[in-house]
Image (spheres, rainbow, N blue to C red):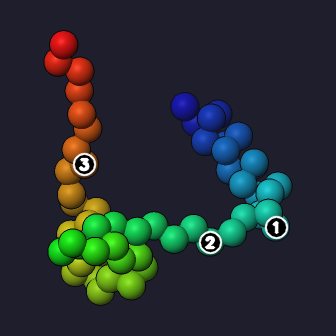
Amino acid sequence: MKNMKTTANQILEENQTLRTKCLVYTRVMGYHRPIESFNIGKKGEHKQRTHFTEGKYC
């Protein structure tokens, strides 16, 4: 596992100039907002959310 992290860090360092900022949006009260515009409390609440995953029941 540690070897995998080291490899990932090496890849990130080598490609640092190619990286760009990624905006993550979430649906709040019927409309979409970027998470970066949330206040500290709302960001913490967003991190604690349980994400829904649909399973197969057939």
Categorize mark 3 by other alpha carbons within 10 Å: few (<14), some (14-19), many (20+): few
Q: Secondary structure at mark 2?
A: loop
In the image, what residue type sits under mark 3?
Answer: His
The residue sitting at 23% across, 21% down in the picture is: 56
In the image, what residue type sits under mark 1?
Answer: Thr
Query: Looking at the image, is 53 positioned above or below residue 21?
Result: above
Picture disc at residue 45: none
Q: Are marks 1 and 3 in contact (CB under 8 Å)?
A: no
Q: Position of residue 47 (x, y in %)?
A: 28, 62
Q: Nearer the viewer, mark 1 or mark 3?
A: 3
Quarter where residue 57 is shown: top left
Q: Secondary structure at mark 1?
A: helix
Picture disc at residue 17: 1
Q: Which residue is mark 3?
A: 51
Q: Position of residue 38 (x, y in %)?
A: 32, 82
Q: Secondary structure at mark 3?
A: loop
- Of pointers 1 and 3, the one earlier in the residue sequence: 1
Viewed as shown, does residue 22 lie left or right of 47? right
Q: CA distance from mark 1 to mark 2?
A: 12 Å
Viewed as shown, does residue 30 lie left or right of 16? left
Say if residue 56 shows up in the picture.
Answer: yes
